[in-house]
Image: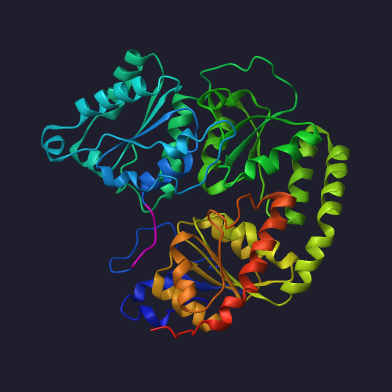
Amino acid sequence: MPFILPECDKHVPERKKHVYIKDDTDECHIPACNVATIPGDMTERGCTYAGCRGVVGGPVKDVIQLQHGPIGCCYYPWDVRPNLAKDTNFQLVNVFSTDLRESNIVFGGEKKLYESIIEANKAFPKNQGVFVYATCVAGLIGDDIEAVAKRATAAIGKPVVAFNCPGFHGVSQSLGHHVGNEVLFNKVVGTEELADKTPYDINLVGEYNIRGDDWLILPLLEAIGLRVVCTFTGDSSIHDIAKMHQAKLNVVRCARSAKYIAEMMKDKYGTPYVEVDFYGMQQTADDLRTIAKFFGLEQKAEEVITKELADIKSEMDFYRQKFQGKKVMIYEGGPRSWHWPKAMEELGMEVNVVATTFGHEDDYEKIVSRVKNGTLLIDNPNAPELEEMMVKYKPDLFISGNKEKYLAYKYGVPFLNGHTYESKGGYMVFKGFVRFAKDMYKSIYSPAWKFIKTREAG
């Protein structure tokens, strides 16, 4: 039977439909996903606000990012995700909140929101707009943030964009991605014109410049002969987003968080899109070929690919030798869980457990198509499940996010932060994959593991 109930879930039998072993003969073929967390299950999911503010809207570098709610909700976006920008890190080092208190809950927070926008704009006059995000409290008391944003726009003469994304709305942070895409599409995209259009203009969609990933990708695209109008939303300006509609092609990097806007642009403007991985050598090469083919630039793409592969060959040969037969357990938010299995196999590694926090059906279909029979898939895992699988499958490396680091260390399992990375540089495309491999090597072969006394689950 492809579905299994982990031993730790004996009191939550509903979890069985979320834990699946790949079996090509099975008709179901994916675990249950994108549904509300089962009561009593210790989920690791984030909220709708986190998906909207922390992922989609937050990287925009030249707007005031204003959280409408209690001050506690401000902790999450404060430098948690290293969405870097070339000329400023205003969006990382400055966090704005209306700091709603008891009196605002009783009498409403709209006045305080309006005053906060005016005050923040006065303190930082160089900003190009204001993004306002509703939290649970703002949603529960019914503040009309859209109306306030409209008034404030007239007052400051800059766009004030309201995101109605209270945390309780939806089953995970995934809905926040959708809200962020929809609002930016309806309120910002198409509001400015591109003065110097070229036949080779593209948008890089769903790329958030974690540790500088964008700065690894752009030189390759430019070397082929392409120009990126907007990166949605890493290292981007609100003015870049406003001109997105005039690109010839959308290149979708994170399909889970930003395919929505590519679909909307296709419907309204007729802009086609392609999905890419940009992790690993073969996948990156195939992605560049796909993009180049759209513009008839295949020969130039092959020149770029040949040079890049030659530059990293000796290093990757070394890591491939060191990684042969190493078992990997992957747990990420969504797409990286299907971006990475083939990249790991390129290095001789074996992926035996894959999990996502908020994956949808299409995410799991992609995962299933890229892993071998017998691979365990877990939707929305809890900490006891992760512990049990580390003991049962004995991975040589666990790649996950910030929260799972010490859980892995407790069981003596080498860990790599694949969410915001270990190094001060990106992991994507060719040169980034070298850095990724280097960090995996450092984690697996650290001499510290021989001093750790491991423990069993339970």
Q: Which residue is drawn at 57% across and 26% down?
A: 240
Residues 378 and 241: in front is 241
Q: Is residue 340 above or below residue 432?
A: below
The quarter of the picture where residue 204 lies is top right
- The reply to whether residue 330 is visible in this rendering is no
Q: Is residue 303 above or below residue 143?
A: below
Q: Which residue is drawn at 69% across and 71% down?
A: 349
Q: Picture coordinates of residue 271 (x, y %)?
A: 63, 30
Which quadrant is home to the C terminus? bottom left
**Colour setting:** rainbow
Q: Is residue 429 found left or right of 318 in the rendered image?
A: left
Q: Is residue 78 found left or right of 309 in the rendered image?
A: left
Q: Residue at x 67, y 76 (%)?
A: 326
Residues 378 and 447: in front is 447
Q: Is residue 337 found left or right of 6 in the rendered image?
A: right
Q: Is residue 432 above or below residue 133?
A: below
Residues 193 and 430: in front is 430
Q: Is residue 45 magenta?
A: yes
State the predominant SS element of the stretch in magenta: loop
- The reply to whether residue 438 is visible in this rendering is yes
Q: Picture coordinates of residue 428 (x, y %)?
A: 67, 50
Q: Is residue 19 above or below residue 76?
A: below
Q: Does the magenta stretch include residue 428?
A: no
State how many labels appear. 0
Q: Which residue is drawn at 79% across and 31% down?
A: 225
Q: Is residue 403 found left or right of 243 in the rendered image?
A: left
The quarter of the picture where residue 275 lies is top right
Q: Picture coordinates of residue 417 (x, y %)?
A: 54, 61
Q: Picture coordinates of residue 118 (x, y %)?
A: 30, 21
The quarter of the picture where residue 437 lies is bottom right
| Magenta residues (range) | 42-46
